Amino acid sequence: MAELGRRYGFFRCTGCNGQWESSHVYVNNMTGQVAYKQKCKKCNIECDPYHVEELKCSICGMQGKLCKCTKEEKMSRHVNEKRPHRSDLCMKCRAGIRCTSPNLML
Ligand SMILES: [Zn+2]
Ligand SMILES: [Zn+2]
Ligand SMILES: [Zn+2]
């Protein structure tokens, strides 16, 4: 099975032109292709992100490897994440591979 890397994605619905962002976008590390789409909450259409970028640390704002924050710092920060992940719209979660668990928000 291909290894997936987590990214930050920007979505735009082709049906209603609605836009959203998600920190739970997963790409195939080999091909760079987006592995799971997300659904527009209005139209129920599965959409690919039109733009994908490296995750930025919510504490220091640095991307991926550049972040020096400890795991503990990130964990405490993530508990306060303002926008919960919409697993009902996420095709990865719907496939049974949950992005988040109640105890650990990765
Ligand atoms: Zn839509
Ligand atoms: Zn950081
Ligand atoms: Zn998900």
Image (spheres, rainbow, N blue to C red):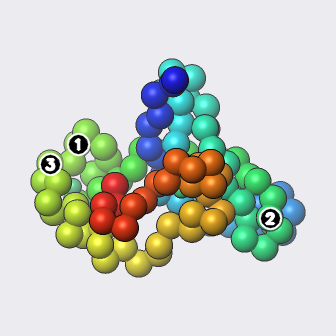
Q: Residue at x 44, y 43 (%)?
A: 6
Q: Residue at x 37, y 67 (%)?
A: 102
Residue 90 coordinates in the image, percent (x, y) = 62, 57
Q: Residue at x 34, y 55 (%)?
A: 106
Tell us which disc is closer to us: 1 or 2. 2
Bin the neighbour count of mark 2 within 10 Å (Cα to Cα): few under 14, some 14-19, many 20 and up.
Answer: few
Q: Name the residue under label 2.
A: 44
Q: Does the residue labelled 3 lie within 8 Å of ligand 2?
A: yes
Q: Is mark 2 within 8 Å of ligand 1?
A: yes
Q: Which residue is drawn at 41% across and 78% down?
A: 82
Q: Mark 1 points at which residue?
A: 66
Which is nearer the eye, 42 or 15? 42
Picture quarter with ligand 2: bottom left
Number of marks in the rendered image: 3
Q: Mark 3 points at which residue?
A: 68
Q: Do the residues labelled 1 and 3 touch (CB within 8 Å)?
A: yes
Picture quadrant where residue 81 is located: bottom left
Bin the neighbour count of mark 3 within 10 Å (Cα to Cα): few under 14, some 14-19, many 20 and up.
Answer: few
Identify the mark at residue 22; answer none if there is no mark. Answer: none
Q: What residue type is labelled 2?
A: Asn
Q: Tell me the distance, in whole angstroms, between the alpha carbons under discs 1 and 2.
A: 37 Å
Bin the neighbour count of mark 1 within 10 Å (Cα to Cα): few under 14, some 14-19, many 20 and up.
Answer: few
Q: Can residue 51 be seen in this view?
A: no
Which is nearer the eye, 36 or 48? 36
Q: What residue type is labelled 3?
A: Lys
